[in-house]
Image (cartoon, rainbow, N blue to C red):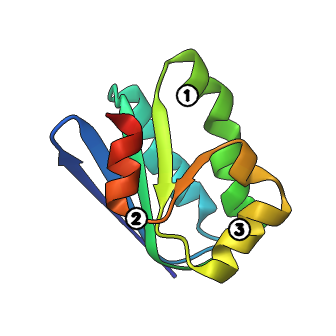
Amino acid sequence: MLQIEKNIENDHSVLSLIGEIDASNSVELDEVILEMVQGGVRNLLVDCENLEYISSAGLGVFMSYLEEFQEKEIRLVIFGLKEKVFQVFNILGLDQLMKIKSTKQDALDEII
């Protein structure tokens, strides 16, 4: 089960992911990110402190936006990954393609 919360704070948006992302709910994540991109988000922080699991389908959602984020100069920073979730990003080399930080403050420092 996945719960997604969106908040706007100052000049950035925070997308909080709670629970698990798998093939059955990755479309929901995709729809939320698309809505944010179409809404003109410039700085997107993804809070994963309460994310317990992410499947390849969930990772694919983030991967599918990398080029568009670059073209539209949208800064994406993921933070708060639990060790087992971070290892999934790491094994696939996604930590080299995306900014991943330990804390929200570190993520904020990245976009300033």
| Residue type for callout 1 | Phe
Q: Can you give x and y, in whole percent of width and height, for residue 19 in the image?
A: 49, 81
The mark lying in front, picked from 3 and 1, is 1
> Helix, strand or loop at disc 2?
loop
> Helix, strand or loop at disc 1?
helix
Q: Judge left or right: residue 1 versus residue 104.
A: right
Give the Cα separation between the discs numbered 2 and 1.
22 Å
Q: Can you give x and y, in whole percent of width and height, for residue 36 in the image?
A: 38, 38
Q: Can you give x and y, in whole percent of width and height, for residue 72 in the image?
A: 50, 18
Q: Quadrant of residue 50?
A: bottom left
Residue at the (31%, 57%) spot, across then down: 105
Near mark 1 (Cα within 10 A), the count class, few <14, some 14-19 or many ≥20, is: some
Residue at the (71%, 68%) spot, across then down: 23
Mark number, residue 23: 3
Foreground of the two, 67 or 99: 99
Q: Which residue is mark 2?
A: 103
Residue at the (15%, 40%) spot, across then down: 10
Residue at the (69%, 39%) spot, across then down: 64
Q: Can you give x and y, in whole percent of width and height, for residue 4 in the image?
A: 39, 65
Q: Judge left or right: residue 57 versus residue 24.
A: right
Decide which of tag 3 and tag 1 comes sooner along the chain: 3
